[in-house]
Image (cartoon, rainbow, N blue to C red):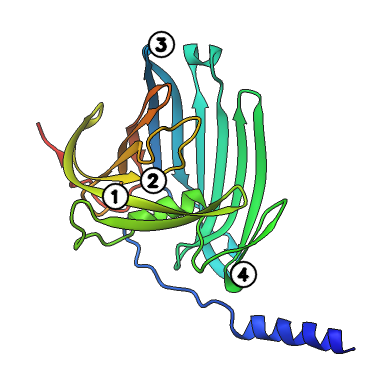
Amino acid sequence: MPRLLVILLLFCCLSAFSQPYRKVHNTAFVRGEKLTFRVAFNSVLTGSITGGKATLEVKNDDKILNNRSTYHVVGEGKTTGFIEIFYKVNDRFESYFDQDAIVGRQFIRRTRENSYKKDDLVVFRQEDLLAVSLTKIVKVPANMQDVISAFYYARTLDISNLEPGGIVHVPFFLDDSVYNSRVIFKGRETVKTKIGKFRCIAFRPMVATGYAFDDPYPITIWLTDDANRMPVLIESEQSVGRARVELISYSGLANPVTAKLVD
């Protein structure tokens, strides 16, 4: 009986002091946005070749989770053509994240990379500061993200007072672990792509070194320097060569693309 009383009291305390939701002002993206990317690789062995295609789409549905509206984003990436002889990828990631707080609610992962397979479902209990995967329950900080919701949250950040070299911290949950990536703001640059030139803001996020990366900051991401904060280019220096992910089409944006330059 005393043990049951303790359990009941603990439950009441968790309910009474659950984490409140923040409010994020988002004007960067809306339902219906779709971005399509060309993936190219360059190495000593292969030279420069187009190796894949990737998409990011904010679906039109509004799934209600815990009595709150969510955004539903699907990210897919596939290798194509010659490169599949060496390395075959067919990945799909889905994120449901809170519409007003821009925090993770559910994350679905389906990874197929050569013989490696990984499937997972993570439910974020933001009120209780818990992430529940298929294999583990992990205590997490407030406002925890998955890898997709973290990117969309980063697009909403106000960087008007951030100087080059400044750091933004973006926490996320992956593989039953909490990461706190340091993202360095490089500054403003002009980027040329297949679909035109864009005024951009550039960032370098920190990643874990190891098999793929020798440098903790091997990736540079260029986002349009306008209200959309749309990713137009991602370059990654890897142990076996360089990857370039370039935007080739976009639709359903929240705002006009004012960062595109006219030749």
Q: Nearer the viewer, mark 3 or mark 2?
A: 2
Marks 1 and 2 sit apart, C-alpha to C-alpha, by 8 Å
Local crowd size for mark 2, using a 10 Å CA cut-off: few (<14), some (14–19), many (≥20)? some
Q: Which residue is mark 4?
A: 66
Please tell me which of labels 4 and 3 falls first in the chain: 3
Q: Nearer the viewer, mark 4 or mark 1?
A: 1
Please tell me which of labels 2 and 4 falls first in the chain: 4
Q: Amino acid at mark 3?
A: Thr
Q: Which residue is mark 2?
A: 206
Q: Which of the 4 image quadrants contains residue 136?
A: bottom right
Q: Nearer the viewer, residue 109 or 207?
A: 207
Compared to residue 194, the image places residue 260 above or below, namely: below
> Element under label 2?
loop
**Residue 197 seen anywhere in this rendered image of the structure:** no
Please tell me which of labels 1 and 2 falls first in the chain: 1
Q: Are marks 4 and 1 in contact (CB under 8 Å)?
A: no
Local crowd size for mark 1, using a 10 Å CA cut-off: few (<14), some (14–19), many (≥20)? many
Please tell me which of labels 3 and 2 falls first in the chain: 3
Q: Is residue 183 left or right of residue 172?
A: left
Q: Amino acid at mark 1?
A: Ile
Q: Are marks 1 and 2 in contact (CB under 8 Å)?
A: yes
Q: Nearer the viewer, residue 53 or 203?
A: 203
Marks 2 and 4 sit apart, C-alpha to C-alpha, by 33 Å
> Element under label 3?
loop
Q: How far across and down, in percent of the image, does residue 259 sit?
A: 18, 45
Q: Is residue 142 left or right of residue 250?
A: right
Write the residue at 51% across / 27% down: 78
Q: Which residue is mark 3?
A: 46
Local crowd size for mark 3, using a 10 Å CA cut-off: few (<14), some (14–19), many (≥20)? few
